[in-house]
Image: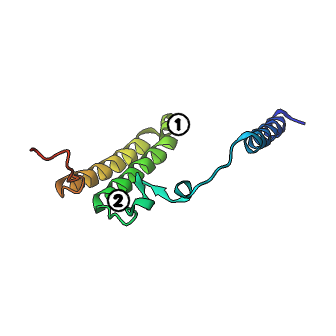
Amino acid sequence: MNTFSLYIYIILIISVLLLSINLIFSTHNPYMEKKTAFECGFHSFLGQNRTQFTISFFIFALLFLLFDLEILLIYPYTISAYNNGGYGLIIMLIFFVLLTIGLIYELGKKALTINSKQNRIL
């Protein structure tokens, strides 16, 4: 038995042990409010579950995913940057320029502004 399989067995034993301890010693007293849905800070039992969100929240989420994927795609280049040479650098610069142009376009269309009560001057 090698060390990797030993680690896997230890992790499985610890996870089953901790789950069983939780099931044995935790208190179980569900009540109606606890069983209702709670999402994004809105309680559904107060009648606020049909609150509409503005599209800007979804645009922020999509931009977050875009730049998160950018980091994911840059990581292999940074690991092998010494072997890539100038060609890899030029490709990554083109990639950065395209993403920057897209971000500037979003800023120019004012798609990232959220109308909030906090921004209003009284």
What residue lies at 68% left-to-right and 44% top-to-bottom? 27
Q: Quadrant of residue 8?
A: top right
What residue lies at 9% left-to-right and 44% top-to-bottom? 122
In the image, taking residue 40 as reference, residue 28 lies left or right, namely: right
Residues 93 and 121: in front is 121
Mark 2 to mark 1: distance in Å? 32 Å
Which residue is farthest bottom?
50
Q: Which mark is residue 58?
A: 2
Amino acid at the residue labelled 2: Phe
Q: Which mark is residue 79?
A: 1
Amino acid at the residue labelled 1: Ile
In the image, taking residue 30 as reference, residue 98 lies left or right, namely: left
Say what secondary structure mark 2 lies in. Answer: helix
Residue 41: x %, y % from top left: 40, 51
Residues 20 and 98: in front is 20
Whichever of callouts 2 and 1 sits on the residue coming sooner in the sequence is 2
Mark 2 neighbour density, 10 Å: few (under 14) some (14–19) many (20 or more): few
